[in-house]
């Protein structure tokens, strides 16, 4: 059974920083891309940032220059460093990973979500 466990959300003032972590565990042969999505109340889930197994990154225009995605392949963990946070960054943030379990091809897995609130 594969699990993604997120941590690091919380309440922060505008201009502040937070670091999200997401660790994949269980029976894993290989992990391809990993990423972070977010969903604000009344809005659709959107891609925030993604990173391939080789380290190539992709960001939503709204977070470029403020957020940095990284991963530690040895720990099956992806991180999202969020700086200069704005109230519009408030959302539930979800970790996503394309994982190959034993005897199967790749499938998408999701974390449970972690709340990020940016407010004074």
Image: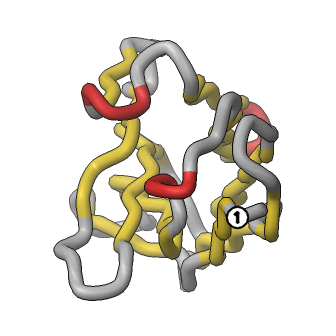
Q: What's the residue at 25%, 69% (across, down)?
A: 45
Question: Residue 9 appears in which quarter of the rendering?
Answer: bottom right
Task: List the single residue furthest toward the front.
Answer: 120
Above or below 29: residue 50: above
Q: Secondary structure at mark 1?
A: loop
Q: Is residue 73 visible?
A: no
Residue 17 lies left or right of residue 62; in this view the side is right
Above or below 23: residue 109: below
Where is residue 16 drawn, in percent x and y?
80, 40
Q: What's the residue at 34%, 54% (across, down)?
A: 98
Q: What's the residue at 73%, 36% (across, down)?
A: 15
Q: What's the residue at 80%, 53% (across, down)?
A: 13
Q: Is residue 79 visible?
A: yes
Comparing 64 with 31, the one in front is 64
For the rendered model, the colour scheme is: secondary structure
Where does the C terminus fall, quadrant-wise?
bottom right
Q: For the residue carrying disc 1, how many other residues have a C-alpha within 10 Å: few (<14), some (14-19), or many (20+)?
A: some
Residue 112 lies left or right of residue 41; in this view the side is right
Where does the N terminus fall, quadrant-wise?
bottom right
* Residue position for label 1: 119
Comparing 3 with 66, the one in front is 66
Comparing 21 with 120, the one in front is 120
Above or below 45: residue 67: above
Where is residue 56 drawn, in percent x and y?
38, 13
Question: Residue 26 appears in which quarter of the rendering?
Answer: bottom right
Where is residue 93 drawn, in percent x and y?
52, 66
């Amino acid at each position: 059974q594969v699990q993604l466990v997120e941590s690091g959300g919380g309440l922060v003032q505008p201009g502040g920083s937070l670091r999200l972590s997401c660790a994949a565990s269980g029976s894993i042969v290989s992990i391809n891309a990993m990423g972070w999505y977010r969903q604000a109340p009344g809005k659709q889930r959107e891609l925030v940032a993604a990173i391939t197994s080789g380290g190539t990154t992709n960001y939503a225009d709204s977070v470029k220059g403020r957020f940095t995605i990284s991963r530690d392949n040895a720990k099956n963990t992806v991180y999202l460093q969020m700086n200069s946070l704005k109230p519009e960054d408030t959302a539930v943030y979800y970790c996503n990973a394309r994982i190959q379990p034993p005897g199967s091809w790749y499938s998408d897995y999701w974390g449970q979500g972690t709340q990020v609130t940016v407010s004074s």
